[in-house]
Image (cartoon, helix red, strand yellow):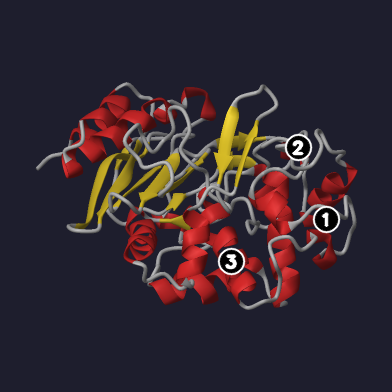
Amino acid sequence: MKSAILDQLMSLVNQGIIPGGSYAIIDRNQGIDIETFGFFQLKPTPVANRTDVIYDVASLTKTVSTTTLIMMLVEKKMIQLDTPIYSFLPFKMDPSISFFDCLTHSSGLAADLPKAFTLQNKEDVIKRIIEQKPIYSKGTHIVYSDIGFILLGLAIETLLNMPLDEAADQWIFKPLGMNDTGYHPETSRTAPTEFRNDPVFQGVLQGRVHDEKAFAMGGVAGHAGVFSTAHDLAVFAKHLLDGTFPLHSESLDMLFSTALERPDLKGTMLKRGIGWDKPTGRSSAGQFADPEATILHTGFTGCNMFIDRKHGLGFVLLTNDVHPSRDQKGVMEIRHELANIVYRERRNIR
């Protein structure tokens, strides 16, 4: 059966809002269905999409790689979630900030670093982080923060005494059979993103991470840097749904639970799990997701995924929404309805 999801996405392609992409529906009962649509690139010339395309998954890095590694470290009793993160960093800021605070975006740290496009290298990023002052009292608000996840990535490297990309490959991607997932993709298979033109880099980003902070860090960071396919992320989600993921059942229960509920700086109440977002408002998991059994996340390049354990459903969408520039970004407007279609078509929920 041809899904209405494809109609929605092709409408965006035909309007020139997104070039194309791949999506996967993960069904505990029916397995994984994958569809590829639209174009691999639009500039300099349109090229039809292919089934083997790898995408920059942006902030899905926070969940698939960084959060998973942190939970593995907890299981190995190398840390606890309330352990101060600066115990494992070569620099000090607020000594009370814990792994939990960074994972739930409640650390007091700002969302981003100013003028990130000027960052030259990893040392520049760390220096700029050290200069940042808290923007709210720790634990009082939820403010989505790349900075907190950069710190998590650095702490993982210290704890494991290996680069973050090697740790993710060894502990997550290879064990799960995610053979097209990693921080250093095959360039020719990678969907191009934005044309970057600044003092650090000039040209189309293809096979190189879109996020400026991760770019400065050599493409390997806790908040961004992973490239993947709809197939690989569907495999990741299917293992979570099936309970065959390489974490203990208690850890999986913790991942799907609401860890914190706090307002953002504008007063809107938000919920966060450990590393993952939880459904609130018009979330990218739609209106039918079970709020207690669902985790989700989005990425700036035009990707998102959700996993609902109660209904046995998951969804992954990967696009290069920032190609040829971020000015036409529009896929986020239909994420809520795409999720609703998944529930209507697979579980007949109306």
Q: Which corner quadrant holds the N terminus?
A: top left
Q: Marks 1 and 2, how far apart in space?
A: 19 Å
- Residue that label 3 marks: 71
Distance, label 3 to label 2, CA atoms, is 24 Å
Kindly identify which residue carries mark 1.
123
Where is residue 77? Give x, y as percent.
Answer: 67, 76
Marks 1 and 3 sit apart, C-alpha to C-alpha, by 27 Å
Residue at 88%, 48% in the rendered image:
130
Please tell me which of labels 1 and 3 falls first in the chain.
3
First in residue order: circle 1 vs circle 2: 2
Q: Quadrant of residue 163?
A: bottom right
- At label 2, the amino acid type is Ala
Q: Residue at x 32, y 58 (%)?
A: 231
Give the secondary structure at mark 2.
loop
* Residue neighbourhood size for the residue with mark 1, other residues' Cα within 10 Å, grouped as few (<14), some (14–19), many (≥20): few
User: Residue 79, position in %: x, y?
Assistant: 71, 70
* Closer to the camera in the image, 140 or 194: 140
Front position in the image: 216 or 269: 269
Q: Quadrant of residue 200?
A: top right
